[in-house]
Amino acid sequence: MTQNTPRRIVVVGGGPAAHRFVESMCSRGMVEAGRFAITVLTEEVHRPYDRVALSRALTDTGVDLTLGDKSLWETDGITLVTGARAVDIDLEAKEVITAAGARFGYDELVLATGSNAATLPIPGNEHTMVYRTLEDVRSINAKVSELAGRLGRTVNAVTIGGGLLGLEAAAGLQALGANPVVIDGGKWLMGTQLDEGAGQAMGRLIADKGLQVHGGVFPAAVLTETDGDGQARVTGVEMADGRIIDADMVVVSIGVRPRDELARTLNDRARAEAAAAAGKAPGELGEEDFVPVFRMGARGGIVIDESCGTDVEHIWAIGEVANFGGMCVGLVAPANTMAEIVADRLHGGDAAFTGFDTATKLKLSGVDVASFGDAHAKTAGALEVVYADPARGVYQKLVVTDDARTLLGGIFVGDAAPYTSLRPLLGRELPAEPGAYLSAAGGGETPDTELPDDAVLCSCNNVAAGSIRDAVNGCGTCAGNDPVRELGGLKACTRAGTQCGSCVPMLKKLLETELAKSGIAVSKALCEHFAMSRAELFEAVRALGLTSAEQILARFGTPVEVVTAEGRPATAAPLGCDICKPVLGSILASQHSAYLLDGGRGVLQDTNDRALANMQKNGTYSVVPRIPGGEITPEKLGVIARVAGKYGLYTKITGALRIDMLGARLEQLPEIWKELVEAGFESGHAYGKALRNVKSCVGSTWCRYGVQDSVSMAINLELRYRGLRSPHKLKIGVSGCARECAEARGKDVGVIATADGWNMYVGGNGGAIPAHAQLLAKDLDDETLVKYIDRYLMYYIRTADRLQRTARWVEELDGGIGHVRDVVVNDTLGIAGDLESAMARHVENYEDEWAATLKDPERLRRFRSFVNAPRDADGSILNVSERGMLRPATDTEIAAAAGSAPVLLGASIPLRPAD
């Protein structure tokens, strides 16, 4: 190999470990520099995806779980080959052979083959399903739908296995509308992570969520019967004690087995060759009669050393297939660590793997669970400090050394709040006595602990607290070593919090602590005039019943320093700024349905709201009448055509199923709207931070695939929420079937019809950072759907930050979509009635803003090009005819018309509307 020839690396496997290895190699710069060429072989058809989030794909088959930036696979020197199953390794030729016969040469080979779902050696096992890959969960989803349609009743779905994946699968089946049953041979759930007290607490909480658990007995057989088509149908599970558990489908999730077939193939070949040389059959050879190519673990897996190297030089193993210290572990953190170590070694480093971090924190069926370190207190002399409250379903335990000083491990069920601050202190002396950290015991706030620099804050990505501090203070590895002052940038720079997310609260706290140390105020202030956040200000205004900006400014505004006419210093109420004034206007509009521009509220609004129209680039305005659900009569289409033709307006059908008329001058707006209002139109609020539209397909009224009347539902929702002011614009979509023609999952609220009602999705949006909406509730009737949307929108309006879309709001809420579901569906805060009442007041008091404007001559005075101008045409706007309509002239066209140097747009456009 010449010095200029890249070193060939083949990675077998396309899971998270492989992805992290490729990322780590690329981050060092040698791949793009041509020093390495990496080929990744994966038997799946997908790019590497997040297996930790498989539960999302179970309930939402369209979700994108792709890991990291997709551009990684477009990097020069990186080749991803999908659908390529490796079946053999030619050690002499140093080639990997696929099932299709393709050969891939390597200089370094990384085995990241992961694991398979374990199966049960019982009769009827061939009729069970497993929970391991995207195809698995999509098949489970399809099976539930197929059975529900065929049986015409709730599907009885049995999950065998009470561990992490088993409970996750059962919760997903419940979310799909099935009746979930869990069978677990252990005495308590999650026996690997939890002790008996925690497991029993978990069992009670799971039962309260509607999951039936049969524990302490193993299944003996999966029962089936043959239907009229000759197909075997699952009917139940026979238990070892003779009981029969009714079942229509069975999902097995009892653990995983390392995918070590490649190593075993080479070992079997070596055994066969040794047997032939000895004149024996392979089965006649003892272990001492031949040397295996790879050492294997007693329960599977390829044995590695601290470098993650195998017994074969230049072959490495990472992730679930790697056996270290007699163990294979299926967790993200150790897989990532192994990937980083191999990348470091290939670059000449000496990083070493020291053991598995088995810490786990997750939410199962809404129940917080965490386990870390020596959770079962196996260390000699270990003490267990326990708080248990069976009535509340709470169990908290810390394991410490015999002097009660050093933290060895812990378990939390029902309330895992202390986990994030305690996990980095594993193996260290606690700053306070252990009982002080058991938050559920009612001892007040847990001690505020400052993490040492070498404490690992993010175990998934092995990021220490010191690295976080370096990034915040500008001493880290971020581009330019510039200080990182916000959470998103800190996550991007350090990768902390980008995997499972459990460390994000601690990451945020550390960021704020470091900023405070640097003298940088950590403030939620809306602006210089208000020390409160938008959500705090909203609640304060609501609680005191304030109805004007002057009242709010006087009560909560920060006084400003002024100088009197006599030259003496004094204080005065703030006048507000471009940040807080629109917020005040929005808060008042959300809480009171008075005309937007009356009572001094006009000065609070931005240009578009003051004109009740969107200003365009040439100073003209757009006119967008509401077309609820996209349904419009031919007569109303004729009105729009007539108005557009009369005033020379450019017309465009929008993505919101409305017709935009552009090019209206300010003084023309009342005239145009008078004709539209008389024809039955009203404002579409295209100019406001409010509901824009509700998009729908034709639904069951016309479409042969439709299962619900999506048009009627869309019209009802649009008429209900029209004019609703919010922190940002709102869009809703209603699709009449799963084909999703209304693109509902790209909306703030998405409604998708099912055979049994409506599925409600929330938190979607397009824009620069698009987000798919997440499933909130399934198979809702009309009344419940509207009730949940009422609650969701009003909760968002009350608690979101200024100009925060619902997607980012859901992401940044503690608990994310789970918290939203708790508030909206389960009413855990006890405010559902209040939220519904607030929405009812909005509906009752709604008045179209343009209809109200046309009734009042004083309000019409705003619509003049210049403050003292008569209402005649403005001749300063230059338009050009194109495709049969007028559009704004370009700079070049304006210059040509003027016959001189280019005229800056804006130099001669109309003034904004008068305040």
Image: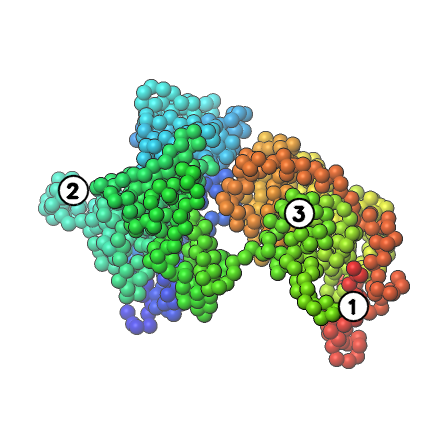
Which residue is labeled 2 in the image? 282
Q: Is residue 652 visible?
A: no
Quarter placement of the C terminus: bottom right
- 175 up-or-down from 813: above or below: above
As drawn, the residue found furthest toward the top would be: 242
Residue 680 sits in quarter: top right
Which residue is labeled 1 in the image? 909
Q: Nearer the viewer, residue 173 or 794?
A: 794
Q: Amino acid at mark 2?
A: Pro
Tell me where residue 425 appears, x and y as whole percent.
Answer: 34, 50
C-alpha gap between disc 1 and disc 2? 91 Å
Q: Residue at x 16, y 42 (%)?
A: 282
Q: Residue at x 30, y 50 (%)?
A: 429
C-alpha gap between disc 3 and disc 1? 38 Å
In the image, 577: left or right of 300? right
In the image, 76: left or right of 340? right
Q: Nearer the viewer, residue 129 or 793?
A: 793
Callout 3–callout 1 Cβ contact below 8 Å? no
Which residue is labeled 3 in the image? 541
Q: Residue at x 21, y 54 (%)?
A: 311
Tell me where residue 506 appears, x and y as whole percent.
Answer: 43, 52
Nearer-N-terminus badge (3/2)? 2
Q: Secondary structure at mark 1?
A: loop
